């Protein structure tokens, strides 16, 4: 029998504060798996019951109080799950799960890469240095990946010219500086991984997933960046039949500044 798997990723900017729109998203779009970042919630306080009532009984969480945090919630059972600490910081930025698909299984990594602060100089900005070290550690870990793998999450980098509203104006702004864009590409190629969003959307088209809260009318101004990503190993890329940025969710009540991204795989 043909198999279909839908995976969504969303930086929710506090899962408890924005639980109503998470519930709305799951009700309206019903992905098989939803990966959340910036849950800002200790594991003990995660809203398990509310999500299980919607049919998402399988939940892997790696959280902490007030900051960071990732969670993967699924209608499909997990074959395996793990979480990894990066850079010896003790913060919660990764959780991995494995779900059955197409007669085998897919390893799904959910990441929240450090934002990196404001100054794009690792010599004077420890946050930017942390971001670069985090990317280096990811590169080493994922080099020559041999199992069917999907990486999703807020990677906090918009790597290409049309992933930002103004390439020229953002070249010295953290998230689009040449150094971090190069490191992200090095990591992607080490896998190697396919950027599924750009597989479906041509490089010369603007593509955003994040719009600042600072804009009075974020949609009209449309000064976005593509900070959220879905990648896969080359074996899964041909099975990627669709990928969408669900921009409308950025305009829901009390929204995150990120929109969800959802990919469909068909075996």
Image (cartoon, helix red, strand yellow):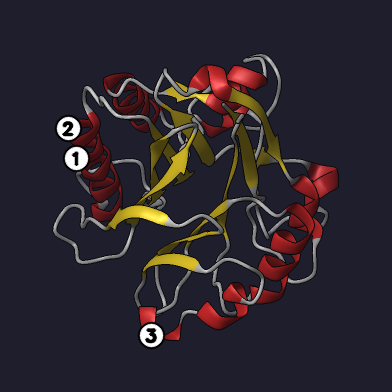
Residue holding disc 2: 140
Number of labels in the image equals 3
Report if the CB atoms under discs 2 and 1 are less than 8 Å apart. Answer: yes
Separation of residues labelled 1 and 3 (CA atoms): 29 Å
Please state the horizontal and vertical placement of residue 101, each as a whole percent of the image.
48, 37
In the rendered structure, which disc, 1 or 3, sits on the residue that comes first in sequence?
3
Q: Residue furthest bottom?
A: 45
Q: Which mark is residue 194?
A: none
The residue drawn where x is 55% and y is 72% is: 15
Quadrant of the rendered image containing residue 200: top right
Badge 3, how many Cα within 10 Å: few under 14, some, many 20+? few
Question: Which residue is tagged 1?
Answer: 137
In which quadrant will I find the N terminus? top right
- The answer to which of 66 and 188 lies nearer the viewer is 188
**Dot 3 corresponds to which residue?**
44
Task: Verify CB contact (< 8 Å) between mark 3 and mark 2.
Answer: no
Which residue is painted at 37% across and 78% down in the image?
Answer: 43
Residue 47 visible to an observer of this rendering:
no
Closer to the chain start, of discs 3 and 2, is: 3
Q: Is residue 254 above or below residue 153?
A: below
Which of the image's four quarters has the C terminus? Answer: top right
x then y, percent, for residue 92: 31, 64
CB contact under 8 Å: marks 1 and 3: no
Residue count near mark 2 (Cα–Cα under 10 Å), binned few <14, some 14–19, many ≥20? few
43 and 11: which is toward the camera: 43
Q: Please, is residue 34 above or below residue 41 in the view?
A: above
Counting other residues with Cα less than 10 Å from the Cα at mark 1, is it few (<14), some (14-19), or many (20 or more)? some
């Amino acid at each position: 029998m043909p198999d279909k798997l839908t995976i969504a990723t969303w930086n929710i900017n506090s899962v408890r504060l924005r639980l109503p729109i998470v519930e709305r998203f799951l009700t309206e779009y019903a992905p098989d798996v939803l990966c959340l970042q910036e849950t800002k919630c200790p594991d003990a306080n995660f809203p398990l019951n509310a999500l299980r009532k919607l049919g998402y009984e399988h939940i892997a969480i790696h959280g902490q109080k007030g900051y960071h945090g990732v969670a993967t919630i699924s209608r499909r059972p997990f074959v395996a799950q793990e979480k990894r600490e990066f850079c010896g910081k003790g913060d919660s930025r990764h959780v991995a799960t494995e779900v059955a698909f197409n007669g085998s299984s897919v390893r799904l990594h959910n990441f929240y890469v450090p934002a990196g602060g404001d100054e794009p100089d690792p010599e004077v900005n420890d946050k930017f240095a942390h971001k670069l070290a985090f990317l280096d550690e990811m590169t080493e870990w994922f080099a020559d990946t041999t199992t069917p793998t999907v990486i999703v999450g807020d990677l906090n980098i918009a790597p290409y010219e049309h992933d930002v509203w103004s390439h020229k104006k953002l070249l010295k702004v953290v998230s689009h500086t040449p150094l971090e864009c190069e490191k992200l590409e090095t990591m992607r190629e080490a896998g190697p991984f396919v950027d599924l969003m750009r597989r479906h959307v041509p490089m010369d088209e603007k593509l955003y997933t994040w719009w600042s809260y600072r804009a009075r009318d974020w949609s009209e101004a449309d000064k976005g960046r593509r900070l959220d990503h879905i990648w896969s190993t080359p074996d899964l890329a041909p099975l990627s039949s669709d990928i969408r940025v669900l921009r409308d969710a950025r305009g829901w009540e009390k929204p995150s500044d990120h929109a969800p991204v959802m990919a469909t795989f068909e075996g």
